[in-house]
Image: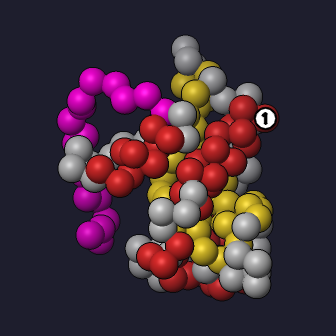
Amino acid sequence: MRIERVVEAAAVRAGAALFDDPPAEAATADFLRDPGHHLLFAYDDTDHPVGMISGVETTHPDKGTELLIYELGVEPEERRRGVATALVQALGELARERGCYGMWVAVDPDNRAARATYRRAGAGEEAPCVVLAWTLIGGR
C-alpha cells in the first residue's frame, strides 16, 4: 500500500467510490485549488484507490492553525487491514509539516470503529461535546 496526496480531479474521479456521494466537479476543483485543503488516497499494489482521507486547515487569531479531519473512507473489503490508521497518521504528518499545532475530528459516539481507528492512530478522546449544525443551502 502507498499513500499519496491527490492534486488532480482525475484521481478524485478514479476514487469516487470512496466518498459518501459522487464528487461534484466544481467542488472538487475548489477543494484541490486551496492549499489548506488536503486529500490523501491509499492505493493497493495494482494502483487501485482503496482508502481516502480529507483534511482542512483552520486558522484562528489566538490559536494558530489546526487541521480538521473532514472525512475518512476505506473500501469495505480493505477494512481492518490498517488502511484507515495509515491514512490518519499520514495526514497527521502532513499537518505537522505544515506547522499545524493540532488535529481533530468529530465522531458519532456510537461509531466504535471510527473511534478505535483514531485512537490507534494516536488520538486521545476528550470530554463529549454537542455538535450543532445549520443547513444553509440545499444540504442533506
Principal secondary structure, stretch drawn in magenta: loop
Q: What secondary structure is found at the residue carrying circle 1?
A: helix
Q: Position of residue 23 (x, y in %)?
A: 52, 78
Residue 46, percent across and down? 76, 84
Pointer 1: residues within 10 angstroms few (<14), some, or many (20+)? few
Please give the range of residues in magenta: 123-140
Q: Which residue is drawn at 35% across and 54% down?
A: 113
Q: Which residue is denoted by mark 1 in the rendering?
A: 97
Asked whether 110 or 10 is in front, the reply is 110
* Residue 98 among those drawn in magenta: no
In the rendered image, residue 49, in percent from the top left (x then y), is placed at 65, 77
- Under mark 1, the amino acid is Glu
At a point 48% along the width and 58% down the height, the residue shown is 71
Count of marks, rendered view: 1
Q: In this orientation, which residue lies closer to the viewer: 29 or 89?
A: 89
In this view of the protein, can residue 54 be seen by the observer? no
Against 53, residue 125 (above or below) is above
27 sits to left or right of 37: left
